[in-house]
Amino acid sequence: MSNRRPYVGGNWKMHGELAAAVELTEDVAAAIGDAVQAVDVTLFPPFPYLQAVGHALRQAGIGLGGQDCSPHLEGAHTGQTSPAMIADLGGSVALIGHSERRNELGEPDALIAAKTRAALAASLQPVVCVGETMGEREAGNALQVVERQVRAALEGLTSDQVGTAVVAYEPVWAIGTGITATPDDAQSAHSMIRSLLGELYDAELADSVRIIYGGSVKAANAAELFSAPDVDGGLIGGASLKVDEFASICRAAVSA
Ligand code: PEP
């Protein structure tokens, strides 16, 4: 990690119920405590719990985000949630392009780019997820796939817009599997993404954008992963539902 401020997201996916979400929020805020002075932490609860989680966060210094957003700003789009609605409920971040949406729902690169633009238009911080499948890795195409996804998501964005974004490198084979990328594997993808940002924009921007790693991060492996020079924190799924695990991961990001 460099002098970039670390970033840790907790992606709760489609878990929990209202009372448990509020309790988890309060417990996580208490367990992280003052560490929020040195790490940006964002919780991504299921949409129906966004407002309640936002209330439970109160003055904890922890951010709130949606797990997705519509590419449209408003209108006849049944079942979708606009970026402005996320903001209206107190959210300031949108997770975009998670592999569970790319793969289960067939979301293509162009849709992810449109969602990224919509999030920015509503002044939300996009956390854009990219990552290769095991098949793509085994075929030797991991870095090309990730490069294609990053180029597509950022197409047409200004340097100022990209400066507000976070990129999450999440190899699909590591998500929810218990298999984690090695710090070297993560570093090679992160460093490629940073070089690409330098090529598409400039060195100053490339040096400032947070690139976080996701895929079976837990308290036991977080410090090692976060010690890689271009890994600026993590996007955490399963372990974000466990208070002590998630708090230790946040502290590992501070110490890295
Ligand atoms: C994720 O959902 O983004 C994720 C990284 O999940 P897990 O930590 O459970 O692998």
Image: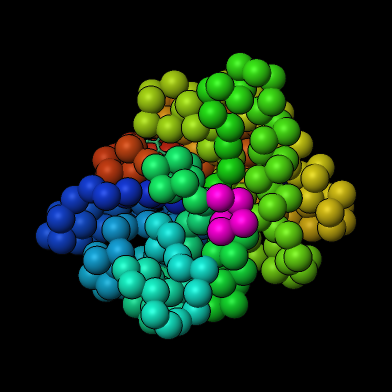
Relative image position of residue 91 (x, y in whole percent): 41, 71
Name above or below for residue 11 compared with residue 40.
above
From this viewpoint, which residue is outermost toward the top? 138
* Magenta residues (range): 108-112
Q: Nearer the viewer, residue 225 or 151?
A: 151
Taken as a whole, is the magenta stretch helix, strand or loop?
helix
Relative image position of residue 254 (x, y in whole percent): 53, 45
At x 79% / y 50%, what residue is drawn?
197
Image quadrant of ligand 1?
top left
Residue 34 sits in quarter: bottom left
Residue 111 part of the magenta segment: yes
Residue 224 sits in quarter: top right
At x 79% / y 58%, what residue is drawn?
205
- What is the quadrant of the N terminus in the image? top right
Relative image position of residue 66 (x, y in whole percent): 40, 63
Name above or below for residue 2 compared with residue 132.
below
At x 67% / y 35%, what residue is drawn?
145
Q: Is residue 16 visible?
A: yes
Q: Is residue 50 left or right of residue 73?
A: left
Name above or below for residue 108 compared with residue 93.
above
Relative image position of residue 126 (x, y in whole percent): 56, 62
Residue 247 part of the magenta segment: no
